[in-house]
Image (tube, rainbow, N blue to C red):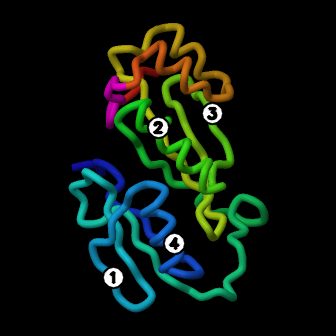
Amino acid sequence: MPVQRLNHAVLYVRDVERSVAFYREALGFEVVMGMRGAAFLQAPGSTNDHDLGLFEIGAGAGPSPAGRTSVGLYHLAWEVDTLDELERIAARLSEMGALVGASDHSTTKALYAQDPDGLEFEVSWLVPAALIDDEVLAARSSVRPLDIAAAKQRYGGQTRGGVGVSVPA
């Protein structure tokens, strides 16, 4: 049987307590298990044992060079159900000074943020498959600034996103 989905991600961080506080405040994650120098967090509503593992490597750790001087992971993407939730998280990340970008990829609406160690992550809403038309497909060839108000006007703030739905080629 093929791979079904990503179950969890693990990050090396400078300070586990600081990172736990950030992910709790920014995304509502809760600690499901912890030990000295490590914590395992679960996203609200998740059925995974944990969604994010954090391992402390200390304050002296250098920044990740991934994408600048070496290969490595660029970012993780967390998915939300509604545009109202994306908007709420955008406001929260902005208040925290963590929001670094917002893009409209046509079939997805995405926020980009950085955690306290400068590790980038994405929070996105997927256009439901039933609402993907030729215009939406054609727009995938460019990335535009995200206008959440316009997306909510088009799709509705409470329209459930296309969680796990494939987009036509």
Which residue is at a point 57% across and 13% down the rendered structure image?
138
Q: Secondary structure at mark 1?
A: strand
Disc number at residue 34? 1
Compared across the picture, whether 119 is left or right of 84 comes to right
In the rendered view, tell whether residue 72 sits above or below residue 100.
Answer: below
Compared across the picture, whether 122 is left or right of 165 comes to right
Which amino acid type corresponds to the residue marked 2 in the rendered image? Answer: Leu
Q: Position of residue 39 (x, y in %)?
A: 38, 78
Crowding near the residue tagged with mark 2, few <14, some 14–19, many ≥20 C-alpha atoms within 10 Å: many
Q: Position of residue 66 (x, y in %)?
A: 68, 64
Compared across the picture, whether 54 is left or right of 68 comes to left
Q: Earlier in the sequence, mark 1 or mark 3?
A: 1
Q: Earlier in the sequence, mark 4 or mark 1?
A: 4
Residue under label 3: 103
Q: Are marks 4 and 3 in contact (CB under 8 Å)?
A: no
Q: Position of residue 25 (x, y in %)?
A: 46, 60
Rounded to the nearest angstrom, the CA distance separating label 3 from label 2 is 12 Å
Rounded to the nearest angstrom, the CA distance separating label 4 from label 1 is 13 Å
Residue under label 2: 86
**Is residue 71 a member of the stretch shown in magenta?**
no
Residue under label 4: 19
Crowding near the residue tagged with mark 4, few <14, some 14–19, many ≥20 C-alpha atoms within 10 Å: many
The outermost residue toward the front is: 95
Which residue is at a point 48% across and 79% down the rendered structure image?
17
Segment colored magenta: 158-165
Q: Earlier in the sequence, mark 4 or mark 3?
A: 4
Q: Are marks 4 and 2 in contact (CB under 8 Å)?
A: no
- The residue nearer to you, when weighing 91 against 143, is 91
